[in-house]
Image (cartoon, rainbow, N blue to C red):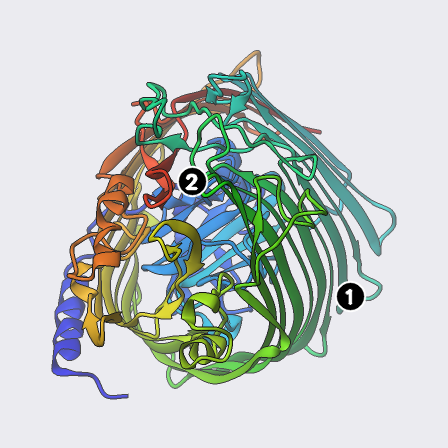
Amino acid sequence: MRLTKKQKALLRRSAAVMLALPAVSMDPALAQTAPATGEAATNDMSKVVVTARRRVELIQDVPGAVSAIGGADLEKTSVSDVTKLTDLVPNTTLKASRATNTTLTAFIRGIGQQDPVAGYEQGVGIYLDDVYMARPQGALTDIYDLERIEVLRGPQGTLYGRNTIGGAVKYVTRKLSNKPTFGIKGTIGNYNERDLVLKASTPINDMLRIGGSVAMFNRDGYGKNVLNGRDNYNKDVGAARISAEFTPISDLFIRFSADRTKDDSLPKQGYRLTNGPAPGNEAPLPNFYDTRSNLYTVLGHENQVITEGQALMAEYAINPELSIKSITAHRKSKSYAPIDFDSMPTPLFEAPAIYSDDQKSQEFQLTYTGSKLQGVAGVFFMKANAFNEFDVLYNALGGLSLYTLDDIDTRTWAAFADLSYSITDTFNVNIGGRYTDDDRKARIFKGTFLGLTGSPTLGNPSAKGLPANTDLGKNDLHRDDTKFTPKVGFGWKFAPEHNVYGTYSQGFKGGMFDPRMDLAGSGGPTSAASLIKRQGVNPEEVSSFELGLKSNMNGGRLQTNAAVFYTDYKNVQIPGSIPTYNAAGQVSGFAGTLTNAGKAKIKGLELEAIVRPTDALTVTGMYGYIDAQYKEWMVASGANLVNVAHAAEFQNTPKHSANLSANYDWALPVMGRSGTLSLYNSVAYKSKVYQAEIVRTTGVAALDALVPQNLALAQDGYTLWDASLVWTSSDRKVQVGLHAKNINDKRYKVAGYAFGGFFNTITAFYGDPRRILATVDLKF
């Protein structure tokens, strides 16, 4: 693929900037202190080990943008879950999905997906020990037994496959010790926070080790339901993980692991930004965490998410250079989600929903590590099902239950290879590719039932239904997408302290069907418009160029990473919902709007650095800049097509993100025990963030009606300040900490619903308020 003149100029300017930048100190402390073993932190990033390329290597040798955050450091500063990485990693947004506690919304470099409905595919891949988590439900887990988290930015199509066009997030768990271990960690805090983690492991003999962890995370709500007194934004999560590691011979390692998480937190109800409808006209509440919501159950079930999985990994070293690995996995989840869109005391516009998913996967990897040639090749197969059904209870026209069922089957397989060859001691070339076959079948039903008591499967078996809007089976909705995604690059260590790299890579996100498809409004199931909808939307495709410089100077006391990137983004999949109208012009329901927006261009800059002026002081920081613009987004306006790209912004993508952190250590013995007292401060900044795309007028009436509500959900730029004071014994067996999160007590929107056409409903969800925590961590 040829570069345009503008792209060549951008890369030339960026290379010049990076070569002049080795003294910039902009990278979060945690993101560059990941320990190689998870037992102790290291301030020398040149020693941090990652598996970003499916093989063990030093992070500074990886020709790509990778941040590694050590589990020990996350625990030391009381980072509870992966969403905190939003403040630590450039051009990355990780957050709880709207109205949920443990469903993850992930965006990297402008690419992601925020709607968790079955059928929508992620743009950022989430992995647990190299096992792909196909659905976002339950992917937002508390951190309690990790060696590290790796964040890979940019398309990862070659090694990680479909749905990683923005990047990937990898949870890497700890291997078991060859000695008996036991640990206990307790946390107490404001809002009556009470967390407890127990970990233990023991060798049975020279070949077999077993271990497990049990964790409980509890907290009262940040707010209340002002009418019934129930907590809002509370937490009630239990989790467990067991593992067994077997080494029958020195060249064979086998690990079995199983995990289960149960989230019994109350529904996270949104804050209504607008007055309630007549006759009450209730004004918005004074506390952003309070609500007037009425919906708390689905079929008698309280809000609940249960996620579990099992994995069997076997790795055999054929010889010192060649090894083979097998990863067999099964994961599933089920959710009962009462979603009250309008946040009002009477049922106006709300959705009792049930989600479930089941996936089975198998992967084989062959890894070669020679003196000049290194690489990995393999095959991958996954069979998955994603299911949901929900009523949208709409209190108009006598009361309607708008029912949707989605049952999506996916079968995907891929073959891949990624090789690196050292032409000289200082220059290497990288080449890779992946062929993917993505087969998808869907059953979609959308219908209207009279009354507010629900549809036949969600509470009212005798509900009277109107003719179905959509009723299509898996023989009606079937598509098979294939794609080859290549990657080429180079690495050049032009000086002992500096390593420059360049990559070109492609990725794709699978094609899909609109899970809220309404064929009745398109003239019936066989009309020309409906036949087009039944084909689904095409896969998203990205082509990305990246140029980077990794430097390690002054004996590791000054380390910098810099990267610039340019991404050509095609067939952008934009989901949404719009009101539908009856013959009298009254709103009578809603319909999905899933389209390929067309084209977008994304370019940006990322800087990360760490400086240690003394052994006691570490100053770190990061800066991310991204310029993401839609170039073509064609929509119908009467008999014409109109390009509305000028009116759109990328959601969940702040143009600027930054972090500045400092850690100072003092030697401080306590009660005759030597140790270190650490003071850690971190300040993070995000510029304006949009939650929906259309934020300027287009001349298309249906879209222009969305502008005020979408702007109401936008969050202006904000700053967060965290601090920790932690004492750690020299043998690392005792750690006591005092932590403050969001010290400035900033209120900032992280998600929301914009349904202005339904009772002027606009509801927002907010990030955590100020939290004060005390932790004690003991190891035996």
In this rendered view, identify the residue nearer to me: 442 or 731: 442
Q: Quadrant of residue 721?
A: top left
Tag 2 secondary structure: helix
Q: At x 32% / y 59%, what residue is drawn? A: 110
Residue 266: x, y in percent? 58, 30
Tell me the residue that label 1 is attached to.
250
Q: At x 16% / y 63%, what residue is drawn? A: 646
Furthest residue in direction front, as rendered: 584
Q: Nearer the viewer, mark 1 or mark 2?
A: 2
Residue 256: x, y in percent? 77, 57
Furthest residue in direction bottom, as rendered: 1
Tell me if residue 280 comes above or below residue 128 in the rendering: above
Tell me the residue that label 2 is attached to.
84
- Classify residue 673 as left or right of residue 343: right
Q: Quadrant of the N terminus?
A: bottom left
| Amino acid type at mark 1 | Ser
Residue 597: x, y in percent? 31, 70
